[in-house]
Image (cartoon, rainbow, N blue to C red):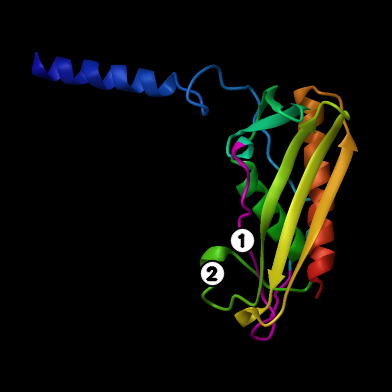
């Protein structure tokens, strides 16, 4: 009897876990979206002097971007979310990985993950991903990133705003595709800003 009770409890727990979506309720979309770099990949070994590496930190995001869904700015005070559009991870992490990979592909820099920064932080890029969604008033996807770059030891610091807008219909497939394109434009501009 005790063994049957344990098995029944385990099955009930498994069923409740499987029934939950990534958002904690409701149906999970059939397709999850991610960001993919558009810059061509070239395999190569790189070596740079101390202080010439680049570390891209995960950007700070507002509350409406701390979810797996894509915000729609309906009005200055009203935010909704695109139906059936969900990321595989939160936008801050996806964007950080995209910028990291784009800098790696577009420059000769050695790009370190923040977990590797103790080796040699070199240039450190931080920032705020202010907007990453669809603006219903303009019919555009918008990616806006305020970046700051500091040399090792903070002897030189500069900042810059990057923004890309692309027309899009409000459906999930178009918004997802156009957000990827806009994010890539911003990542390419960041790579050019970093240089090297």
Query: Looking at the image, which residue is at 70% across and 74% down?
Result: 45
- Residue 46 at x, y = what percent? 70, 76
- Residue 119 at x, y = what percent? 54, 77
Residue 42 or residue 72, whichever sits in front: 72
Report if residue 132 lies within the magenta region.
Answer: no
- Residue 174 seen: yes
Residue 98 or residue 2, whichever sits in front: 98
Compared with 115, 24 (above or below) is above
Which quadrant is home to the N terminus?
top left
Whichever of callouts 1 and 2 sits on the residue coming sooner in the sequence is 1
Q: Residue 107: which numbered mark, if any? A: none
The local secondary structure at tag 2 comes to helix
Residue 138 or residue 88, whichever sits in front: 138
Assign the magenta stretch its main secondary structure: loop
Instruction: Decide: few, some or many residues near mark 1? Use Cα within 10 Å; few <14, some 14-19, many ≥20.
Output: many
Query: Looking at the image, which residue is at 71% across and 69% down?
Result: 149
Residues in magenta, as a range: 44-63
Report if residue 50 lies within the magenta region.
Answer: yes
The residue beneath circle 1 is: 57
- Residue 78 at x, y = what percent? 70, 25
Compared with 194, 173 (above or below) is above
Compared with 96, 115 (above or below) is below
> Rounded to the nearest whole Å, what is the CA distance between mark 1 and mark 2?
11 Å
Query: Looking at the image, which residue is at 74% across and 28% down?
Result: 72
Instruction: Decide: few, some or many residues near mark 2? Use Cα within 10 Å; few <14, some 14-19, many ≥20.
Output: few
Q: Residue 116: which numbered mark, if any? A: 2
- Residue 114 at x, y = what percent? 56, 64
- Residue 106 seen: no
């Amino acid at each position: 009897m005790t063994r049957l009770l344990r098995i029944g409890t385990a099955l009930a727990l498994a069923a409740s876990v499987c029934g939950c979506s990534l958002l904690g309720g409701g149906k999970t979309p059939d397709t999850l979206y991610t960001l993919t770099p558009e810059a061509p990949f070239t395999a190569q070994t790189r070596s740079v002097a101390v202080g010439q590496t680049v570390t891209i930190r995960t950007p700070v995001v507002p509350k409406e971007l701390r979810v797996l869904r894509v915000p729609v700015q309906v009005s200055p005070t009203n935010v909704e979310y695109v139906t059936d559009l969900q990321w595989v991870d939160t936008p801050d992490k996806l964007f950080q990985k995209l910028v990291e990979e784009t800098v790696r592909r577009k420059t000769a820099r050695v790009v370190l993950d923040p977990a590797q920064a103790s080796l040699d932080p070199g240039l450190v890029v931080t920032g705020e991903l202010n907007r990453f969604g669809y603006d219903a008033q303009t019919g555009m996807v918008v990616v806006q990133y305020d970046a700051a770059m500091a040399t090792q030891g903070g002897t030189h610091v500069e900042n810059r705003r990057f923004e890309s807008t692309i027309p899009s219909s409000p459906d999930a497939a178009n918004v997802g595709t156009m957000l990827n394109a806009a994010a890539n434009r911003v990542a390419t501009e960041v790579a050019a800003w970093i240089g090297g």
